[in-house]
Amino acid sequence: MRHYNKDIESNSLKQKGLIVEFTGKDAYISYDITVHSYLCLPLSSCNMLPLTSNTLDIIRKEYEELRLFLIDGVSLISFQLLYNIDRRLQEIMHILPTPFANLDIIFFDDLCQAQLLHNCWIFEHLSLKETTAHSFWRDNVIKCELR
């Protein structure tokens, strides 16, 4: 985060990095926010509606200098949710069609956990007609394994 706060031309009161959690329990423990709350995502992965203009204005003003987006609990994020995160970030940052609105995204968690029920992992290649979220993961995410 210090790297992003070095920019002397930016407003020091504006948030440059944001950590979001997948579960409410993790967000509560670490004093963060859930990815669903921050991005106003529905709990169901389908039928994501655009944000209202008032909500969009509030989020854009608060996070206009956002450059770093850390997502904890990535092993719990489904393929469809990753696609919705990408779409919502593009809508908020008003940068289309750049993957993840050209923000630096850091995903972290243990990817060797049990597979999600009724969903597939974000790194699985599926032939879904309505989405190409797998290409976001494959083309834009560099895997670094800590041992």
Image (tube, grey):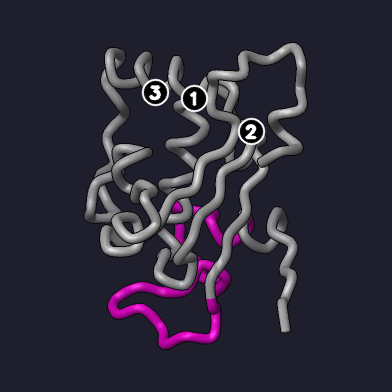
Q: Which of 9 and 70 is in front in this view?
A: 9
- Quadrant showing the C terminus: bottom right
Q: Residue type at mark 1? A: Tyr
Crowd tier of the residue under label 2, counting other residues whose Cα lies within 10 Å: few below 14, some 14–19, many 20 or above: some
x and y percentages locating residue 33 in the rendered image: 35, 46
Give the vertical position of 137 relative to 100 (above or below).
Answer: below
Pointer 3 and pointer 1: residues touching (CB < 8 Å)? yes
Identify the residue position indicated by label 3 in the image: 59
Local SS, label 2:
loop
If you read the primary sequence from the N terminus, does the residue marked by circle 3 or circle 2 appear first? Answer: 3
x and y percentages locating residue 81 in the rendered image: 39, 56
Identify the residue position indicated by label 1 in the image: 63
Q: Residue type at mark 2? A: Arg
Residue occupying the point 51% across, 67% down: 122
Query: How many circles with numbers are drawn on the protein?
Result: 3
Residue 98 visible to the viewer = no
x and y percentages locating residue 40 in the rendered image: 30, 38
Give the vertical position of 96 relative to 131 (above or below).
Answer: above
Numbered tag placed on residue 67 in the rendering:
2
| Left or right, 23 with reference to 73 | left
Pointer 1 and pointer 2: residues touching (CB < 8 Å)? no
Spatial CA span between label 3 and label 1? 6 Å
Numbered tag placed on residue 42 in the rendering:
none
Please report the bounds of the magenta region as a residue range.
110-135
